[in-house]
Amino acid sequence: MFCQNHSLQPWNSFHLDVYAEKISVINSAALLCKAWQDSHRQQQPTLLLGEGSNVLFLEDFTGHVLINRIKGIRVSETEKAWLLHVGAGENWHQLVEFCLQRGMAGIENLALIPGCVGSAPIQNIGAYGVEFRQLCDYVDVVHLPTGHYRHFTVDECQFGYRDSQFKHASCDEYAIIAVGLKLNKIWHPVLTYGDLTRLDPVTVTPKQIFDAVCHMRRSKLPDPAVTGNAGSFFKNPIVEATKAQDLLQHYPAMPRYAQSDGTMKLAAGWLIDQCELKGYQLEGAMVHRQQALVLINQSDAKGHSIVALARKIRECVGERFDIWLEPEVRFIGPQGEIDAIKAIS
Ligand code: NAP
């Protein structure tokens, strides 16, 4: 489907008032390749989007935006696991509900994450102690210039903290068309985060975890349907243990989480909050009052205002803690993705 209206406002969760030269909503791998190849022949930049929930448009996009709406969910099973093959254009939260309604557990901690299923592997989405990679069986992609299909095993995806092979230049010409999930029939609840720690591991049900996660998210995070935002704006920094020890001398209450390799994960939201930036506003962009890690489009913000706010936060946190935050959100310039760290340095 070709959109007559070229506004990207409905296609980015910051709701920025930006435009593209052309927008197409596409429901098959073959059509995705054709649209990409046509644009490529005309030397028109292309951008693949799911629900635009992790992007920041700095200005109008001078090219063709391809909205991936490849749908379909197929379920099969082995003795030990449920196997799902899910079209990249399915909505992530609806998939979580679909699984729970059919008694397939393991995905409940990832409730209410905005965005499409096909975006989940790119970012290796994670919340409340569960990451996409733990559920992933494979990722199917299509090579846009040739239309050849390729199947990535979990190892080939090279998942990391909010990272994967699909974020890197080697995958620039690939589109994710489906993901395979494997949900073990023997269920182990993950109750390590927040309110979940209060649930009884013996009697808890997947639905109770789902409800608790939805409640935590709804009470703390702005609903992108109402207030423009892209979730966590920055990644949580991982620092050397010695650096964390130094900081603890001055800030004994600092939240920190030991990693298996001996490093420490710090909470970026806490660092920002220490700089008293909650509620700080800049040209329509604002640091969310409940969760400092989320930047919001408070009133008709421009992409550049959000960049300026992110730069201010990076400077404040950097000067105070000598920790230089890196955006988790991807920055899109007029012709495609740009280096987000450079943009706020
Ligand atoms: P929070 O409870 O305020 O905690 C702040 C940070 O500390 C979290 O980001 C989390 O890191 C870390 N943390 C908390 N408890 C932990 C534990 N038991 N073990 C290890 N690390 C722990 O976090 P929040 O903002 O409400 O978010 C809750 C969860 O939802 C987090 O997992 C967060 O990543 C996820 N979330 C993600 C986004 C996004 O856009 N990516 C947006 C909102 C929430 P991790 O982030 O590494 O888990």
Image (cartoon, helix red, strand yellow):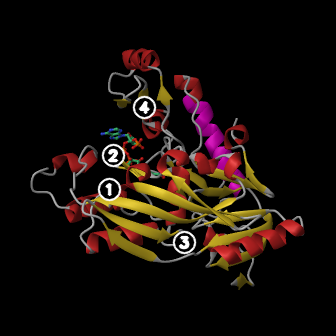
Q: Please tell me whether residue 304 belongs to the stretch shown in magenta.
A: yes
Q: Earlier in the sequence, mark 4 or mark 1?
A: 1
Q: Residue at x 21, y 56 (%)?
A: 186
Q: Residue at x 67, y 52 (%)?
A: 171
The answer to the question of whether label 2 and label 1 lie on touching residues, with beta carbons closer than 8 A, is: yes
Disc 2 versus disc 4: nearer the observer: 2
Which numbered disc covers residue 228? Answer: none
- The boundaries of the magenta stretch are 302-317
Which numbered disc covers residue 109? Answer: 1
Q: Earlier in the sequence, mark 2 or mark 4?
A: 2
Disc 3 versus disc 4: nearer the observer: 3
Q: Which residue is labeled 3 in the image?
A: 89
Packing grade of label 3 (10 A; few <14, some 14-19, many >=20) is many
Q: CA distance from mark 4 to mark 1?
A: 20 Å
Is disc 2's CB within 8 Å of ligand 1? yes
Packing grade of label 4 (10 A; few <14, some 14-19, many >=20) is some
Q: Earlier in the sequence, mark 3 or mark 4?
A: 3
Label 2 amino acid?
Gly
Q: Which residue is labeled 2 in the image?
A: 129
